[in-house]
Amino acid sequence: MGEILKNIAGKGSISEKNVQDAVEEIKIALLEADVNLRVVRRFVNRTLEEAKGEKVLRSVEPGQQFTKILYDQMVGLLGDARQELDLKGPDVQSVILLLGLQGSGKTTTAAKLARSLAAAGRKCLLIAADLARPAAVEQLKVLGSQIGVEVYSEAGSTPVKVVMGGLKHAERGLFNTVLVDTAGRLHLDSELMTELKEIAEATRAVERLLVADAMTGQQAVDIAKEFDERIGLTGIILTKFDSDARGGAALSLKTVTGKPIKLVGTGEKLGDLEPFYPERVASRILGMGDVVSLVEKAQAAMGAEEAEDLQHKMESETFTLEDYLAQFARIRKMGSVQALIEMIPGAQGKIDESAIDEKELKREEAMILSMTPFERKNYRVIGPSRRRRVAKGSGTTVYDVTHFLKKFEKVRLMMKKATKNKKYQANMLSKLGA
């Protein structure tokens, strides 16, 4: 998608033919991303209608104008603005039902959401009502213990009775947020829907959230429509969203069902659940990056004091291998290298991922861990005998260790230049966005 926009941005002027050609390419790209055909037609028609205006065709910067039109239309399809969970006040019980097919990630998502709400100050209770899948109850208990949230379960009962028992337990324990992990099936069936309808009616849930796998594409839309017609959805949580950079499922689900996508799962860790921001996702789909999310991830990985301390070390050339090692943990906290590159405007296809090979980072980490604390603080003392020891301890070669130490020296020099020279910083940023 980013290449299409780059091509049209390079035009001296925009004619109706330019627009038509670009829209046709976008249409193909969206269909390849498994976007619903009806959604593609709606997007294309709206874009053509908007782009054929006299103001756009005679614009001084027509490429940028057309990109803005595409962006606005896509944000509109995705939902315009972030949708919060509709929870009651802290003194009133709010019930959240998590629905979906087996394998969509319901149980893990229940724990992720409970963790997020607990961190926001809500007192959460998880109810293990998935009695259809073997070990589902045990899985939720394990996850609950990891995040410090209580899990309610009953042996030899029915899902409806478990839920009702859980709600009574929540009242006695003054839990203001109850999350119900319901059963899924490998396919939609009447038994599943009847069971879920009974639970929905009994709980009077404020949120009935469909947990859908972003990678299922068109199938996710059909599933969402069926659940909405039978149960009445209030929103959608998309799992494995980090694997679907094209955003096909997100575009289709919101447009076809009319239900907002409220949250997205962006990884396997229990902290990998984020609000769904239509404008940021639209930027990613169009290859414009997502700088806001990148900054937020960086802020979460490093506090203000840590950032100031790091900058001081870079400026004063006291940045050590110990500090370098700490960056590996921060990179992991922010996500995969691929995910980070996708957030940088213009970086896709321009930053060579092999130059930031995650396997190479692991090898470098192993080398540093094989060094003594003294060596990490004074890398220049690592002579031939020490290099042999480090190589042996990290499963690498002396050449690898030597190469890494030379690289580290260059990194220190580059850091010093970047912090001292504002022009150098601007040049580096312009290269990333070029």
Image (cartoon, rainbow, N blue to C red):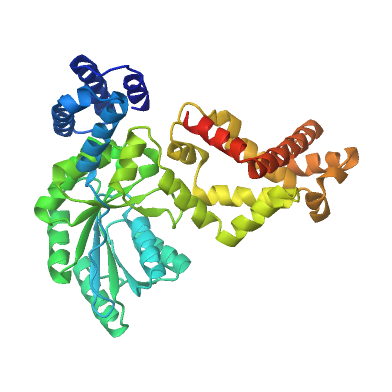
Q: Position of residue 223 (x, y in %)?
A: 18, 45
Q: Is residue 324 above or below residue 428?
A: below
Q: Position of residue 118 (x, y in %)?
A: 39, 69
Q: Is residue 188 left or right of residue 299?
A: left
Name the residue: 62% across, 49% down. 327
Front-most of residues 252 and 221: 252
Q: Is residue 199 left or right of residue 3?
A: left
State whether residue 145 appears in this view: yes
Pick out the residue farthest to the bottom. 172
Front-most of residues 219 and 56: 56
Name the residue: 23% across, 33% down. 69
Q: Is residue 66 above or below residue 212?
A: above
Pick out the residue farthest to the top. 17
Name the residue: 31% across, 20% down. 8
Give the number of callouts.
0
Quadrant of res 49? top left
Q: Is residue 231 above or below residue 48?
A: below
Name the residue: 23% across, 47% down. 80
Q: Position of residue 278 (x, y in %)?
A: 28, 46
Q: Is residue 294 left or right of residue 414?
A: left
Quadrant of res 203? bottom left
What is the quadrant of the N terminus in the image? top left
State whether residue 103 appears in this view: no
Q: Is residue 276 above or below residue 195?
A: above
